[in-house]
Amino acid sequence: MKSSRILSLLSVGIVTVATAQNPNASSPSPAKSSATTDDKAIRPFHFTASKEAVADMRKRIAATRWPEKETVTDKSQGVQLATIQALAKYWATDYDWRKCEAKLKALPQFITTIDGVDIHFIHVRSKEKNALPMIITHGWPGSIIEQLKIIDPLTNPTAHGGKAEDAFDVVIPSLPGYGFSGKPTTTGWDPIRIARAWIVLMKRLGYTRFVAQGGDWGNAVTEQMALLGAPELIGIHTNMPATVPPDIDKAAFAGAPAPSSLSSDEKHAYDQLAFFYKQGLGYANEMANRPQSIYGIGDSPVGMAAWMIDHDADSYALIARVFDGKPEGLTRDDILDNATLYWLTNTTVSSARLYWESKLAFFAPKGIAIPVAVTAFPNELYQAPRSWTEKAYPVPRVLRETEKWRTLEARPNVEPVG
Protein backbone atom coordinates (compact mmCIF):
# COMPACT_ATOMS: atom_id res chain seq x y z
CA MET A 1 0.00 0.00 0.00
CA LYS A 2 1.03 3.65 -0.21
CA SER A 3 2.09 5.99 2.58
CA SER A 4 -0.01 6.53 5.68
CA ARG A 5 -0.57 10.14 4.79
CA ILE A 6 -2.16 9.32 1.45
CA LEU A 7 -4.37 6.72 3.08
CA SER A 8 -5.33 9.37 5.59
CA LEU A 9 -6.21 11.82 2.83
CA LEU A 10 -8.24 9.15 1.14
CA SER A 11 -10.27 8.43 4.21
CA VAL A 12 -10.85 12.06 5.12
CA GLY A 13 -12.51 12.61 1.80
CA ILE A 14 -14.66 9.54 1.92
CA VAL A 15 -16.01 9.21 5.42
CA THR A 16 -17.46 12.60 6.05
CA VAL A 17 -19.62 12.60 3.01
CA ALA A 18 -22.57 10.63 4.30
CA THR A 19 -24.89 13.35 3.01
CA ALA A 20 -28.54 13.51 2.23
CA GLN A 21 -29.73 12.35 -1.13
CA ASN A 22 -32.07 10.63 -3.48
CA PRO A 23 -34.11 11.30 -6.63
CA ASN A 24 -37.15 11.75 -8.78
CA ALA A 25 -38.40 14.20 -11.33
CA SER A 26 -38.07 14.23 -15.05
CA SER A 27 -34.80 12.37 -15.04
CA PRO A 28 -32.53 12.99 -18.03
CA SER A 29 -31.07 9.72 -19.23
CA PRO A 30 -27.32 9.16 -19.35
CA ALA A 31 -25.72 8.99 -22.77
CA LYS A 32 -26.37 5.54 -24.16
CA SER A 33 -25.11 3.45 -27.03
CA SER A 34 -26.46 0.31 -28.57
CA ALA A 35 -24.37 -1.74 -26.17
CA THR A 36 -25.09 -5.43 -25.81
CA THR A 37 -24.57 -7.65 -22.79
CA ASP A 38 -21.13 -8.73 -23.97
CA ASP A 39 -20.05 -5.34 -25.29
CA LYS A 40 -16.68 -4.54 -23.71
CA ALA A 41 -16.40 -1.06 -25.18
CA ILE A 42 -15.60 1.88 -22.91
CA ARG A 43 -17.67 4.84 -24.02
CA PRO A 44 -17.10 8.49 -23.06
CA PHE A 45 -19.86 9.92 -20.89
CA HIS A 46 -21.19 13.33 -19.97
CA PHE A 47 -24.40 14.53 -18.38
CA THR A 48 -26.40 17.71 -18.76
CA ALA A 49 -29.65 18.00 -16.86
CA SER A 50 -32.44 19.59 -18.84
CA LYS A 51 -33.73 23.00 -17.82
CA GLU A 52 -37.14 21.39 -17.41
CA ALA A 53 -35.83 18.81 -14.91
CA VAL A 54 -34.12 21.45 -12.77
CA ALA A 55 -37.18 23.71 -12.89
CA ASP A 56 -39.46 20.81 -11.96
CA MET A 57 -37.27 20.01 -8.94
CA ARG A 58 -37.46 23.59 -7.70
CA LYS A 59 -41.20 23.70 -8.26
CA ARG A 60 -41.68 20.54 -6.20
CA ILE A 61 -39.50 21.88 -3.40
CA ALA A 62 -41.47 25.13 -3.28
CA ALA A 63 -44.76 23.19 -3.26
CA THR A 64 -43.84 21.07 -0.23
CA ARG A 65 -46.74 20.65 2.19
CA TRP A 66 -45.20 21.17 5.60
CA PRO A 67 -46.32 19.48 8.82
CA GLU A 68 -46.44 21.25 12.17
CA LYS A 69 -43.28 21.77 14.19
CA GLU A 70 -42.01 18.85 16.26
CA THR A 71 -43.32 18.70 19.83
CA VAL A 72 -39.88 18.41 21.43
CA THR A 73 -36.93 20.78 21.59
CA ASP A 74 -34.35 18.27 20.40
CA LYS A 75 -33.85 15.97 17.39
CA SER A 76 -35.43 12.90 19.00
CA GLN A 77 -38.45 13.01 16.67
CA GLY A 78 -36.32 13.31 13.54
CA VAL A 79 -35.20 16.10 11.23
CA GLN A 80 -36.38 19.32 12.80
CA LEU A 81 -38.75 21.52 10.82
CA ALA A 82 -36.50 24.58 10.94
CA THR A 83 -33.56 22.59 9.61
CA ILE A 84 -35.36 21.04 6.65
CA GLN A 85 -37.10 24.32 5.80
CA ALA A 86 -33.72 26.08 5.70
CA LEU A 87 -32.46 23.36 3.38
CA ALA A 88 -35.52 23.66 1.16
CA LYS A 89 -35.32 27.44 0.94
CA TYR A 90 -31.71 27.36 -0.19
CA TRP A 91 -32.31 24.43 -2.56
CA ALA A 92 -35.27 26.08 -4.29
CA THR A 93 -33.79 29.56 -4.63
CA ASP A 94 -29.99 29.91 -4.38
CA TYR A 95 -28.59 26.45 -5.08
CA ASP A 96 -26.98 26.05 -8.53
CA TRP A 97 -26.71 22.48 -9.88
CA ARG A 98 -24.76 23.73 -12.91
CA LYS A 99 -21.69 24.34 -10.73
CA CYS A 100 -21.61 20.68 -9.75
CA GLU A 101 -22.33 19.67 -13.31
CA ALA A 102 -19.31 21.68 -14.47
CA LYS A 103 -17.06 19.89 -11.97
CA LEU A 104 -18.23 16.56 -13.28
CA LYS A 105 -17.79 17.58 -16.91
CA ALA A 106 -14.18 18.56 -16.17
CA LEU A 107 -13.40 14.95 -15.25
CA PRO A 108 -12.92 11.96 -17.58
CA GLN A 109 -16.11 9.90 -17.29
CA PHE A 110 -17.06 6.70 -19.02
CA ILE A 111 -19.69 3.97 -19.36
CA THR A 112 -19.02 0.29 -19.96
CA THR A 113 -21.38 -2.66 -19.91
CA ILE A 114 -20.61 -5.43 -17.42
CA ASP A 115 -22.90 -8.40 -16.89
CA GLY A 116 -25.67 -6.67 -18.80
CA VAL A 117 -25.64 -3.40 -16.80
CA ASP A 118 -24.11 -0.09 -17.84
CA ILE A 119 -21.49 0.92 -15.27
CA HIS A 120 -20.55 4.58 -15.04
CA PHE A 121 -17.16 5.60 -13.66
CA ILE A 122 -14.71 8.46 -13.31
CA HIS A 123 -11.19 7.53 -14.36
CA VAL A 124 -8.34 9.92 -13.63
CA ARG A 125 -4.81 8.80 -14.40
CA SER A 126 -1.94 10.33 -12.47
CA LYS A 127 0.88 12.05 -14.32
CA GLU A 128 3.25 9.93 -12.22
CA LYS A 129 4.32 6.91 -14.24
CA ASN A 130 4.36 4.46 -11.32
CA ALA A 131 0.99 5.45 -9.87
CA LEU A 132 -0.86 2.60 -8.17
CA PRO A 133 -4.39 2.04 -9.55
CA MET A 134 -7.17 2.23 -6.96
CA ILE A 135 -10.92 1.67 -7.29
CA ILE A 136 -13.00 3.63 -4.77
CA THR A 137 -16.58 2.65 -3.98
CA HIS A 138 -19.21 4.87 -2.39
CA GLY A 139 -22.18 3.83 -0.26
CA TRP A 140 -25.73 4.99 0.49
CA PRO A 141 -26.75 7.79 0.65
CA GLY A 142 -23.53 8.63 -1.16
CA SER A 143 -22.35 8.89 -4.73
CA ILE A 144 -19.34 9.70 -6.86
CA ILE A 145 -19.81 13.34 -5.86
CA GLU A 146 -18.57 12.68 -2.34
CA GLN A 147 -15.26 11.49 -3.81
CA LEU A 148 -14.49 14.55 -5.94
CA LYS A 149 -12.38 16.30 -3.30
CA ILE A 150 -9.95 13.40 -2.99
CA ILE A 151 -9.15 12.95 -6.67
CA ASP A 152 -6.42 15.58 -6.92
CA PRO A 153 -4.67 14.71 -3.63
CA LEU A 154 -4.51 11.09 -4.77
CA THR A 155 -3.52 11.60 -8.39
CA ASN A 156 -1.33 14.66 -7.82
CA PRO A 157 0.13 14.20 -4.31
CA THR A 158 3.12 16.53 -4.82
CA ALA A 159 0.70 19.46 -5.03
CA HIS A 160 -0.62 18.54 -1.58
CA GLY A 161 2.59 17.96 0.35
CA GLY A 162 3.03 14.33 -0.67
CA LYS A 163 5.59 12.51 -2.75
CA ALA A 164 5.48 11.28 -6.33
CA GLU A 165 5.54 7.69 -5.14
CA ASP A 166 2.31 8.34 -3.23
CA ALA A 167 0.37 8.76 -6.49
CA PHE A 168 -2.66 6.73 -7.52
CA ASP A 169 -4.64 6.28 -10.69
CA VAL A 170 -8.22 6.68 -9.48
CA VAL A 171 -11.30 4.80 -10.68
CA ILE A 172 -14.60 5.85 -9.06
CA PRO A 173 -17.63 3.88 -10.25
CA SER A 174 -21.29 4.49 -9.54
CA LEU A 175 -22.90 1.46 -7.93
CA PRO A 176 -25.53 -0.26 -10.10
CA GLY A 177 -28.83 1.53 -9.55
CA TYR A 178 -27.04 4.65 -8.33
CA GLY A 179 -26.17 7.88 -10.10
CA PHE A 180 -25.34 7.47 -13.77
CA SER A 181 -24.96 3.69 -13.75
CA GLY A 182 -27.71 1.54 -15.18
CA LYS A 183 -30.54 0.22 -13.04
CA PRO A 184 -30.59 -3.58 -12.87
CA THR A 185 -33.82 -5.02 -14.23
CA THR A 186 -33.30 -8.43 -12.64
CA THR A 187 -32.45 -9.54 -9.11
CA GLY A 188 -29.03 -10.65 -7.93
CA TRP A 189 -27.01 -7.45 -7.87
CA ASP A 190 -25.66 -7.84 -4.36
CA PRO A 191 -22.19 -6.73 -3.12
CA ILE A 192 -20.64 -10.01 -4.30
CA ARG A 193 -21.84 -9.53 -7.87
CA ILE A 194 -20.76 -5.89 -7.80
CA ALA A 195 -17.33 -6.97 -6.54
CA ARG A 196 -17.01 -9.29 -9.54
CA ALA A 197 -17.99 -6.45 -11.84
CA TRP A 198 -15.40 -4.14 -10.29
CA ILE A 199 -12.65 -6.69 -10.90
CA VAL A 200 -13.79 -6.96 -14.52
CA LEU A 201 -13.77 -3.18 -14.78
CA MET A 202 -10.21 -2.79 -13.50
CA LYS A 203 -8.93 -5.55 -15.78
CA ARG A 204 -10.83 -4.03 -18.71
CA LEU A 205 -8.97 -0.79 -18.04
CA GLY A 206 -5.73 -2.72 -18.44
CA TYR A 207 -4.69 -2.89 -14.79
CA THR A 208 -2.88 -6.03 -13.69
CA ARG A 209 -2.17 -4.79 -10.15
CA PHE A 210 -4.47 -2.57 -8.12
CA VAL A 211 -5.95 -1.79 -4.69
CA ALA A 212 -9.49 -1.01 -3.57
CA GLN A 213 -11.11 1.31 -1.03
CA GLY A 214 -14.61 1.68 0.38
CA GLY A 215 -16.84 2.57 3.28
CA ASP A 216 -20.48 1.70 3.94
CA TRP A 217 -21.64 -0.37 0.91
CA GLY A 218 -18.23 0.42 -0.52
CA ASN A 219 -16.68 -1.58 2.30
CA ALA A 220 -18.98 -4.52 1.64
CA VAL A 221 -18.02 -4.50 -2.04
CA THR A 222 -14.33 -3.99 -1.32
CA GLU A 223 -14.16 -6.85 1.17
CA GLN A 224 -15.93 -9.13 -1.29
CA MET A 225 -13.38 -8.20 -3.94
CA ALA A 226 -10.70 -9.43 -1.55
CA LEU A 227 -12.59 -12.63 -0.82
CA LEU A 228 -12.96 -13.42 -4.52
CA GLY A 229 -9.20 -13.92 -4.61
CA ALA A 230 -8.38 -12.03 -7.80
CA PRO A 231 -4.57 -12.05 -7.99
CA GLU A 232 -4.59 -8.52 -9.38
CA LEU A 233 -5.98 -7.11 -6.10
CA ILE A 234 -3.00 -6.65 -3.76
CA GLY A 235 -4.63 -4.84 -0.83
CA ILE A 236 -7.67 -2.93 0.40
CA HIS A 237 -8.46 0.04 2.61
CA THR A 238 -11.68 0.53 4.55
CA ASN A 239 -13.12 3.24 6.76
CA MET A 240 -16.04 1.07 7.91
CA PRO A 241 -14.33 -2.21 8.78
CA ALA A 242 -16.06 -5.47 9.62
CA THR A 243 -14.41 -6.36 12.93
CA VAL A 244 -17.13 -7.05 15.51
CA PRO A 245 -16.85 -10.44 17.30
CA PRO A 246 -20.08 -12.47 16.98
CA ASP A 247 -20.86 -12.52 20.71
CA ILE A 248 -20.34 -8.76 20.97
CA ASP A 249 -22.54 -8.11 17.96
CA LYS A 250 -25.30 -10.34 19.31
CA ALA A 251 -25.27 -8.60 22.69
CA ALA A 252 -25.29 -5.12 21.14
CA PHE A 253 -28.16 -6.02 18.84
CA ALA A 254 -30.14 -7.32 21.80
CA GLY A 255 -29.46 -4.13 23.76
CA ALA A 256 -27.73 -6.04 26.55
CA PRO A 257 -25.34 -4.26 28.95
CA ALA A 258 -21.78 -4.10 27.69
CA PRO A 259 -19.65 -7.07 28.80
CA SER A 260 -17.44 -6.13 31.75
CA SER A 261 -14.36 -7.54 30.01
CA LEU A 262 -14.30 -4.82 27.35
CA SER A 263 -11.50 -2.25 27.23
CA SER A 264 -12.40 1.44 27.07
CA ASP A 265 -12.07 1.49 23.26
CA GLU A 266 -14.14 -1.67 22.97
CA LYS A 267 -16.78 -0.30 25.34
CA HIS A 268 -17.00 2.88 23.24
CA ALA A 269 -17.48 0.82 20.06
CA TYR A 270 -20.04 -1.38 21.82
CA ASP A 271 -22.06 1.63 22.93
CA GLN A 272 -22.01 3.02 19.38
CA LEU A 273 -23.20 -0.30 17.97
CA ALA A 274 -25.94 -0.68 20.56
CA PHE A 275 -27.16 2.86 19.83
CA PHE A 276 -27.14 2.20 16.08
CA TYR A 277 -29.09 -1.03 16.44
CA LYS A 278 -31.65 0.69 18.65
CA GLN A 279 -31.96 4.10 16.99
CA GLY A 280 -30.37 3.96 13.55
CA LEU A 281 -31.63 0.87 11.72
CA GLY A 282 -35.08 2.05 10.71
CA TYR A 283 -34.12 3.30 7.26
CA ALA A 284 -32.11 0.14 6.51
CA ASN A 285 -34.89 -2.18 7.69
CA GLU A 286 -37.43 -0.44 5.48
CA MET A 287 -35.22 -0.55 2.40
CA ALA A 288 -34.14 -4.13 3.08
CA ASN A 289 -37.73 -5.29 3.37
CA ARG A 290 -39.79 -2.99 1.13
CA PRO A 291 -37.59 -0.81 -1.12
CA GLN A 292 -40.32 -0.55 -3.72
CA SER A 293 -42.66 1.10 -1.23
CA ILE A 294 -40.72 4.33 -0.80
CA TYR A 295 -42.55 6.08 -3.64
CA GLY A 296 -43.17 9.11 -1.48
CA ILE A 297 -39.53 10.05 -1.07
CA GLY A 298 -39.02 9.42 -4.76
CA ASP A 299 -41.76 11.94 -5.53
CA SER A 300 -40.76 14.71 -3.13
CA PRO A 301 -37.26 16.25 -3.13
CA VAL A 302 -37.74 17.44 0.45
CA GLY A 303 -39.04 14.06 1.59
CA MET A 304 -36.04 12.43 -0.06
CA ALA A 305 -33.57 14.81 1.56
CA ALA A 306 -35.08 14.37 5.02
CA TRP A 307 -34.97 10.56 4.69
CA MET A 308 -31.33 10.62 3.71
CA ILE A 309 -30.22 13.24 6.21
CA ASP A 310 -31.80 11.35 9.07
CA HIS A 311 -30.43 7.92 8.20
CA ASP A 312 -28.09 7.93 11.18
CA ALA A 313 -27.45 10.26 14.07
CA ASP A 314 -23.85 11.18 13.29
CA SER A 315 -24.57 12.05 9.67
CA TYR A 316 -27.60 14.06 10.73
CA ALA A 317 -25.53 15.97 13.26
CA LEU A 318 -22.95 16.92 10.63
CA ILE A 319 -25.51 17.94 8.02
CA ALA A 320 -27.97 19.69 10.30
CA ARG A 321 -25.24 22.02 11.57
CA VAL A 322 -24.76 23.39 8.07
CA PHE A 323 -28.39 24.40 7.68
CA ASP A 324 -28.57 25.53 11.29
CA GLY A 325 -25.91 28.13 10.46
CA LYS A 326 -22.90 26.27 11.85
CA PRO A 327 -20.88 25.05 8.83
CA GLU A 328 -17.73 23.14 9.67
CA GLY A 329 -16.37 21.44 6.58
CA LEU A 330 -19.40 20.21 4.70
CA THR A 331 -21.12 23.02 2.84
CA ARG A 332 -24.74 23.37 1.80
CA ASP A 333 -23.65 22.65 -1.77
CA ASP A 334 -21.78 19.48 -0.71
CA ILE A 335 -25.05 18.15 0.66
CA LEU A 336 -27.32 19.33 -2.12
CA ASP A 337 -25.01 18.31 -4.99
CA ASN A 338 -25.35 14.76 -3.77
CA ALA A 339 -29.10 15.07 -3.19
CA THR A 340 -29.66 16.62 -6.58
CA LEU A 341 -27.78 13.83 -8.33
CA TYR A 342 -30.11 11.27 -6.75
CA TRP A 343 -33.11 13.38 -7.74
CA LEU A 344 -32.14 14.03 -11.35
CA THR A 345 -31.28 10.37 -11.96
CA ASN A 346 -34.47 9.14 -10.23
CA THR A 347 -32.56 6.56 -8.21
CA THR A 348 -34.39 6.59 -4.89
CA VAL A 349 -35.91 3.13 -5.27
CA SER A 350 -33.18 1.58 -7.44
CA SER A 351 -30.47 2.52 -4.93
CA ALA A 352 -32.53 1.25 -2.00
CA ARG A 353 -32.78 -2.21 -3.58
CA LEU A 354 -29.18 -2.94 -2.64
CA TYR A 355 -30.39 -3.30 0.96
CA TRP A 356 -32.94 -5.87 -0.23
CA GLU A 357 -30.37 -7.73 -2.32
CA SER A 358 -27.62 -8.05 0.27
CA LYS A 359 -27.59 -10.90 2.74
CA LEU A 360 -24.19 -10.02 4.22
CA ALA A 361 -23.59 -9.11 7.85
CA PHE A 362 -22.03 -5.66 7.74
CA PHE A 363 -19.83 -5.84 10.80
CA ALA A 364 -18.91 -9.54 11.02
CA PRO A 365 -15.26 -10.39 10.19
CA LYS A 366 -15.00 -12.06 6.79
CA GLY A 367 -11.58 -13.74 6.92
CA ILE A 368 -9.77 -11.60 4.38
CA ALA A 369 -6.31 -12.90 3.55
CA ILE A 370 -4.66 -9.93 1.79
CA PRO A 371 -3.22 -6.77 3.38
CA VAL A 372 -5.83 -4.42 4.81
CA ALA A 373 -5.50 -0.79 5.88
CA VAL A 374 -8.13 0.54 8.29
CA THR A 375 -9.04 4.05 9.36
CA ALA A 376 -11.22 4.33 12.46
CA PHE A 377 -13.26 7.52 12.38
CA PRO A 378 -15.12 8.67 15.50
CA ASN A 379 -18.19 9.62 13.43
CA GLU A 380 -18.59 6.27 11.72
CA LEU A 381 -21.36 3.92 12.84
CA TYR A 382 -18.79 2.52 15.21
CA GLN A 383 -15.13 3.32 15.76
CA ALA A 384 -13.43 -0.04 15.36
CA PRO A 385 -11.01 -0.76 18.23
CA ARG A 386 -7.53 -1.83 17.32
CA SER A 387 -7.96 -5.09 19.28
CA TRP A 388 -10.93 -6.19 17.15
CA THR A 389 -9.32 -4.94 13.95
CA GLU A 390 -6.11 -6.88 14.36
CA LYS A 391 -8.10 -10.10 14.90
CA ALA A 392 -10.37 -9.45 11.91
CA TYR A 393 -7.65 -8.66 9.38
CA PRO A 394 -4.30 -10.38 8.81
CA VAL A 395 -2.10 -7.36 8.10
CA PRO A 396 -3.99 -4.30 9.33
CA ARG A 397 -2.53 -0.84 9.28
CA VAL A 398 -4.66 1.02 11.79
CA LEU A 399 -4.83 4.78 11.42
CA ARG A 400 -6.31 6.86 14.19
CA GLU A 401 -8.13 10.11 13.74
CA THR A 402 -8.35 13.35 15.66
CA GLU A 403 -11.41 15.52 16.11
CA LYS A 404 -10.17 17.73 13.27
CA TRP A 405 -10.83 14.96 10.79
CA ARG A 406 -14.55 15.44 11.15
CA THR A 407 -14.37 18.04 8.40
CA LEU A 408 -13.69 17.52 4.73
CA GLU A 409 -11.24 20.39 4.60
CA ALA A 410 -8.87 19.08 7.27
CA ARG A 411 -5.72 17.45 5.96
CA PRO A 412 -3.73 16.48 9.07
CA ASN A 413 -0.44 14.64 8.75
CA VAL A 414 -1.40 11.57 10.75
CA GLU A 415 0.93 8.67 11.38
CA PRO A 416 -0.16 5.10 12.06
CA VAL A 417 -0.54 3.93 15.61
CA GLY A 418 2.09 1.41 16.62
Image (spheres, rainbow, N blue to C red):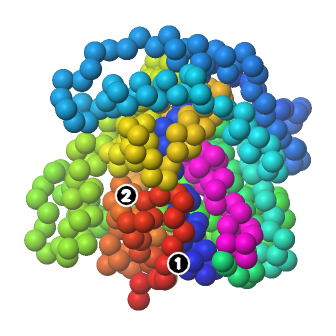
Q: Toward the viewer: 224 or 133?
A: 133
In magenta stretch: residue 39: no
The amino acid sitting under disc 1 is Asn
Image quadrant in which you'd find residue 386: bottom left
Image spot of residue 197 (x, y percent):
69, 52
The residue drawn where x is 57% and y is 40% is 333
Between the residue at mark 1 and the residue at mark 2, the CA separation in whole angstroms equals 19 Å
Looking at this view, name the residue that lies furthest to the front: 325
Image quadrant in which you'd find residue 30: top right
Vertical comparison of 277 with 35: above or below: below
Mark 1 in CB contact with mark 2 (< 8 angstroms): no
Secondary structure under the numbered disc 2 in the rendered image: loop
The residue drawn where x is 43% and y is 37% is 323
Residue hosting label 2: 379
Vertical comparison of 416 with 13: above or below: below
Specify the quadrant that holds the N terminus: bottom right
In magenta stretch: residue 138: yes
Image spot of residue 45 (x, y percent):
83, 41
Q: Toward the viewer: 231 or 202?
A: 202
The residue drawn where x is 32% and y is 78% is 387
Magenta range: 132-160
Image spot of residue 215 (x, y percent):
50, 57
Looking at this view, name the residue that lies furthest to the bottom: 418
Q: Earlier in the sequence, mark 1 or mark 2?
A: 2
The residue drawn where x is 32% and y is 72% is 385
The amino acid sitting under disc 2 is Asn
Image spot of residue 388 (x, y percent):
33, 74
Residue hosting label 1: 413
Regarding residue 112, the answer to whether it shows in the image is no
